[in-house]
Amino acid sequence: MPAIVIIGAQWGDEGKGKATDLLGSRIDYVVKFNGGNNAGHTVVIGDQKYALHLLPSGILTDGVTPVIGNGVVIDVEVLFHELEALTARGVDVSKLRISANAHVITHYHRTLDKVTERFLGKKQIGTTGRGIGPTYADKINRVGIRIQDLFDEGILRQKVEAALDQKNHLLVKVYNRRAISADEIVESLLSYTERLRPMVGDTALELHEALEAGKTVLFEGGQATMLDVDHGTYPFVTSSNATAGGASTGSGIGPGRIDRVIGIVKAYTTRVGAGPFPTELFDEWGEFLRSNGFEFGTTTGRPRRTGWYDAPIARYSARINGVTDFVMTKLDVLTGLAEIPVCVAYDVDGVRVDEVPVSQSDFHHAVPIYETFPGWNEDISGAREFSDLPKNAQDYVLAIEAMSGARISAIGVGPGREAIVSRYDLID
Ligand code: GDP
Ligand code: IMO
Ligand code: MG
């Protein structure tokens, strides 16, 4: 079972980092294929808590080769900062491989991200401000800087100058900011070249060879299905393909090689940033989920918006990604609720709609139709087998499974690495 993809099935922060870590000892390679340091994965191992942004979570497992694929956008300064912080804590990062084709986030991308958001005012997306959107825009516009450009000063200078030619007009004339000097950018990027050199290569070829040799490769998605630039709630999305197809384009591995797609869902729903969210709660129950689930962003510290589980979204994700297994996280957060509502369909302007509507306006108007399930009060954090869960918790999981389009193979009952109920093997 060599190629496995993990993706977020909602709006991010489902616990992808923990799920990756869970499979850690059984994989040989872990590949980040999309996004950049907009991601925030918290992984808890014993009494140690790690917050990863740019590096794949699998880097925490000894022996695993972490790979940053071509589909990722890299802020080189953040990369070295994260590597140094992990090294200081005793994590071996020496095996990291980086695609020569990955794009580079520079100072002007970060600046443009922030000024564009400010310019949008009330209509802003609520980005993480890390320069993600402008860097992908440059990639698509064919004026991006790639990691390989850092090894050729002449080319790098030409590309930075060409990119800034246009951007400085925008920064100065539209946004009233100071112009950015190409020299500064080039100098700063070149200061990383020698440290980068041994890590950079043809990762698509390396992954191909690993798969041919029977190694197990895990593709770890950042963000999530509903934040995917094609399949999410556009324009309130990130700028990459966070869905399973992105694992192929973002790493250079053919789609036919992928054996399994694991969708991570929370037992309820959260979202950071702006955009539609039908089951969002503005009352004490929303606060209950936020405080019990500690729903504050790993990257920006923003309070996450919270709401009940949305089954049409899970079904949509199952379909878009070809999910074979779900891992449901944070079931423990629901402990203590007398009743748990689950969204089973929407009412859109008086009409019942069973699936996520294709029209963005309809989705904005979608009012959840709920079915309510009885809750439980028992502490479930020590459960390891499905039969250890209280009957009502089992019934909640089974009901959700029936609505969500794929089996629920594992259930998170706490933040720790060991706090998991296993139902079906995720690698076999
Ligand atoms: P990611 O971006 O998908 O990797 O998720 P985040 O790390 O941003 O957010 C998930 C949060 O939930 C982290 O703080 C995890 O430690 C925590 N977490 C993951 N699984 C569970 C679980 O089953 N129960 C509880 N209580 N917390 C969990
Ligand atoms: P992980 O991997 C949750 C959201 C931002 C914003 C939108 C666009 O931890 O699940 P961007 O900076 O990417 O241009 O912002 O996407 N967003 C996330 N929300 N989890 C994430 O990552 C996110 N990465 C981006 O809040 O609404
Ligand atoms: Mg996160």
Image (tube, rainbow, N blue to C red):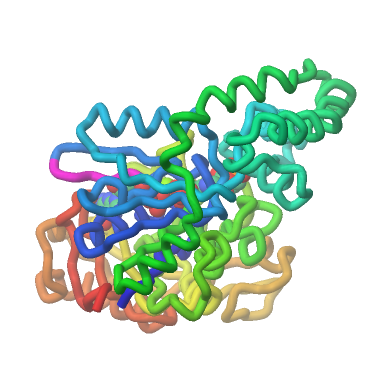
Q: Position of residue 96 (x, y in %)?
A: 37, 45
Q: Position of residue 265 (x, y in %)?
A: 39, 64
- Which residue is rendered at x = 67% and y = 79% of the image? 351
- Which residue is rendered at x = 31% and y = 47% of the image? 59
In the rendered view, tell whether residue 382 sits above or below residue 189.
below
- Which residue is rendered at x = 60% and y = 34% of the image? 150
Of residues 146 and 122, the one nearer the viewer is: 146
Q: Is residue 399 visible?
A: yes
Highlighted magenta segment, given as a residue range: 42-46
- Which residue is rendered at x = 18% and y = 45% of the image? 45
- As drawn, is 390 to the left or to the right of 156? left
Residue 368, by quadrant, is bottom right
Magenta stretch prevailing secondary structure: strand
| Residue 357 belongs to magenta span | no
Image quarter in which the C terminus is found: bottom left
In the rendered view, tell whether residue 157 sits above or below residue 365.
above
In the rendered view, tell whether residue 418 sits above or below residue 216.
above
